Image (tube, rainbow, N blue to C red):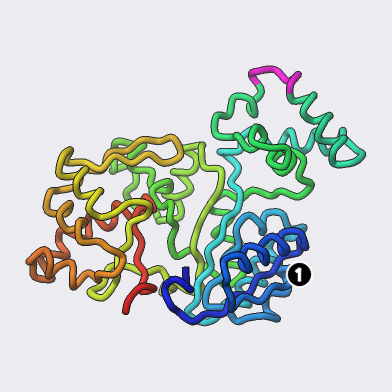
Amino acid sequence: MLTSAGKTYEITYLDLSKSSRKIAETRAKTRGLTGISFHTGSLLDAGQYGPFDYIDCCGVLHHLPEPQLGFDALGAALADGGGIGLMVYAPYGRAGVYPLQEAFGALLTGSPRDRLRRAKAILARLPEGHPFKRNPHLGDHQDSDAGFYDLLLHSQDRPYTIRQLAETLTKAGLEMVGSPQAHLYDPAPLLGDPGLLVGMDDLTRMELAEKLRGTIKTHVVYAAHNAAGRVARPSPHAIPHLKGVTGSKVADVIMKKGILPVTLGGEKTELPVSAAAGQMLRHVTGRADLTAIARAAELDPVAFASIWNSVSADLTRFGLMYYSTLLKS
């Protein structure tokens, strides 16, 4: 992405797995990419290679023997004003996984192939009422042997509730500053009575939503040293992007239906969007900033913001819109 955008960069790849590193290096070479240094090592040593403006750590921290040390290492390696994108497992959406992990860990020995064969045979004999078999949100074990092994035979796997994650980040000198899945942590649509949330702080609301939903398998969040971190928000020179769809396509749907249908994780939602906002979205190209979009809509900044900020909030909390200056000329 950075190469296509014509931006200068330095990327550090750090992984314990030599096999994963080999694959990553081959992919980079095939694409003619440069500016990437590859290292085999632990993320606990990230500070040796930093500081970093941005750190991506997906699906790793929850597998460490002492995860807090991993969070601490990333926090220490992050540059001032930088940000971290991370994913860790969550417990409620993975109902049934952890009892089976413990049982298989106590029962099965031998080579990975032998453990896999025996675990599959045992799983087939379990009653259909087992929480794991009744969980419709789990499918990795059906996709591949690697998926089965990672899900049910992993020797180190610690899930986090959203509160536990927030507390762990705090210990590392970090705090959550956003999520591309923010809609999952809003309990209001599940309650019907907004009065129930009066006086409740943001983290408690997120915690409540996680418990009410019961379907969140992973937490995907952004973290920074402080709340003034690097999560971009609407401003005159911010450039909005739509994920996986063009602005004209979104506008056409809105103009026809008056709503924007959204399906994420099997959940269907209909976002009401005004015709005026729909026409504004038609001008989202990934290169036009909000000032240019307001000009195209023939609106002054105040009138534009009164319409735009609402639709922007809806789309960003569903991970459908984000802001970046990467393609700004």
Q: Where is residue 153 in the image (x, y as percent from the top left)?
A: 77, 40
Q: Residue at x 29, y 72 (%)?
A: 238
Q: Position of residue 328 (x, y in %)?
A: 32, 76
Specify whether 192 is left or right of 125: left
Residue 302 among magenta residues? no
Mark 1: secondary structure: strand
Above or below: residue 52 compared with residue 317? below
Query: Circle 1: is it few (<14), some (14-19), or many (20+) Cα within 10 Å?
Result: some
Q: Quadrant of the C terminus?
A: bottom left
Tag 1: amino acid: Thr
Residue that badge 1 annotates: 40
Q: Which residue is drawn at 15% across and 61% down?
A: 306
Specify whether 259 is left or right of 12: left
Specify whether 180 is left or right of 11: left
Quarter of the image holding residue 241?
Answer: bottom left
The part of the chain drawn in magenta is 124-129
